Amino acid sequence: MAKGWIRKCTSADHPDCPDEPPEVLPWYPKRLIDLGDIVKSKKGHRIFRDDPPHIADDPQRARKEDDPKDSDYVRLVSKDEGGRFMKGFYVTLSHCWGGATFTKLTEDTLSDFKKAINLKDLPQTFQDAIRFARRLGDKPGQVRYIWIDSLCILQADQPSKKQEEDWLEQSAQMHEIYKNSYCNISATAAVDSTKGLFKERKPDLLWEDEINLNTEEIPGYNPNDLIKRCKILDLSFWERHVEEAPVNRRAWVLQERLMAPRVLHFCEDQIAWECRKIDAAESFRDGLANFRLKAGDIERAERLKTFVPHVAESHIHGLSTSANGSAVSPHQTTYNHWRSVVERYSKTKLTNAGDKLIALSGIARLLSGSLPGVKYVSGLWGEYLASQLLWRVDPVFEHGKFSFPSYRPARYRAPSFSWAAVDAEIGITYGEFTKEGLLIKVEEFNILQDKGADEFGLVIEGCNLRLTGALKRIKLEKRLGENGLIRYRWDLAESPRGAEETYSNVYLDSPQDDKDILGPDGRVFCLPARINDEGYIVCLLLQRDKTKWGQYRRIGLTKVPPYDEEGQKQVYDRELSEELRVRDKEEIVLI
């Protein structure tokens, strides 16, 4: 079935999907795992993978000539040491590392890996993926290599300079590694690398997806045609088996799914397929219906593979159409895709919190091709930057209480004005891409990186953004209601309004990590930033730095509703604010 999907995907039936790559690829990763030579058995006509040279020359370990099994060995090959002889396709593996310990590539094992790797020394998922990859392709030996992160990138508990350089070099090429692969094999259901690709299952559950339905008494039924042949559609299938599966909660895997030309998912009870044309599975082999079931409602599906531009030039250069039928500029389409990607990505988890930006860098680089001249700003884009600053983290209301499950990493990762500066379990809501209703103006931004770093990757401390606007000092308070209900409220520092008239529409980025923000000494300010389409004044909540005058950190967002006319006027008096901006040009530096 997998071969059938691939065959169709690389044919004219899928014009937007990449063709089958050439026999000798124009680009290979720095390192790959060689699956072995294809040879014919002397007995009969069976074709199998042979031992790597180092093993074949060892009479104690070499595979016997009449042994019907494939070699139990693979080896690491390097493009730097003979890439001109590389020939054949390579596949990639997406997997959960989990808490399992397993053999990895290190500076100490590098030499041994180039001689041979015994499959028995690898975790079950790697063994299954290697044996499966050996059988892919329409011709024997067509798929010659597999790329597995922990076997192809140097690993270390205490990174050396060489390991760090190797990681930075290869992580910056991650988009190329997946983009140029033949197929991505995803251990979708496995919680760690010991669980393997294959599960015990009941194949009879896949047999029947059509039924005869008696339509009698159903409104609109035809007495002459009572029995209808109907197809069963499980609208929550993709969400349950793919989107919510263990591997797809990993942050790195989102980029892997997006960049790979096609993905083969090994789910709990069947395999599933994802390419630019269709999402499919064994029980929906011709493709799933373009609908999903969410929160009890049926809605049109938003397919992940449509978020990034690929072969179809119309997606990049031409006008596309929005849901209401109006024309959307190519820049706006790209920005809409970026918003969808970030909102999904922000819900995923990272083993290393510092990878937040770099694990998305390949997608950012790809989309930048549709945004010529637009600078990348630590997870945001230079065009429409002011409105993008208005992302938010929604509090969670559950069991009658509000909670704020968001955190800041222990080490600096991104400036406070970027969504990448926080980790939120339920994700973030991205800001709009618009110039309408803005009350602030971005004057300048500075993104700092180490020398030679990928412009879409890691940043270093010192990034900042200068903008002008009308700051108002406020006092932020934490209120405890009935049943321990936590609410945050604020008011202007010198406001005549009563306690019950304070503003409660508050979205804090990480209240447990942002210290000393409460009360009259919190150094907290409200910056009216935009009047949105519903008439709300959307404001940034900023905390002034203790030691650096004029510098502020973002701590959240708030909204003043249109029905609170008095409150809106106190927060933002347009005439007075414009006069102050022209006269004093109050500059705010966000760090």
Image: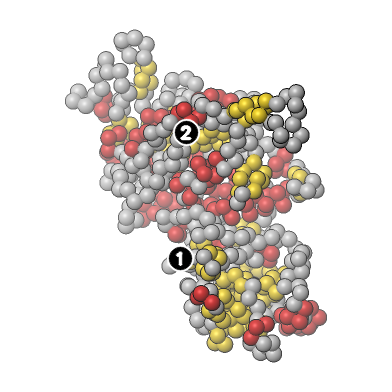
Name the quadrant of the C terminus: bottom right
Inspect the image, locate mark 2, and give the three-letter code of the amino acid beneath it. Gln
* Residue 489 placement, left or right of 434: left
* Residue 129 placement, left or right of 586: left
Inspect the image, locate mark 1, and give the three-letter code of the amino acid beneath it. Pro
The x and y percentages for residue 534 are 76, 66
Relative to the observer, which residue lies in front, 45 or 273?
273
Relative to the observer, which residue lies in front, 308 or 269?
269
Q: Which mark is residue 270?
A: 2
Q: Quadrant of residue 131?
A: top left
Residue at point 42%, 25% (across, down): 135
Q: Quadrant of residue 57?
A: top left
The x and y percentages for residue 78 are 39, 37
Residue under circle 1?
A: 409
Is disc 1 surrounded by few (<14), some (14 to 19) or many (20+) residues within 10 Å? some
Whether residue 434 is visible here, answered yes or no, is yes
Relative to the observer, which residue lies in front, 460 or 243?
243
The x and y percentages for residue 395 are 56, 66
Q: Nearer the viewer, mark 2 or mark 1?
A: 2
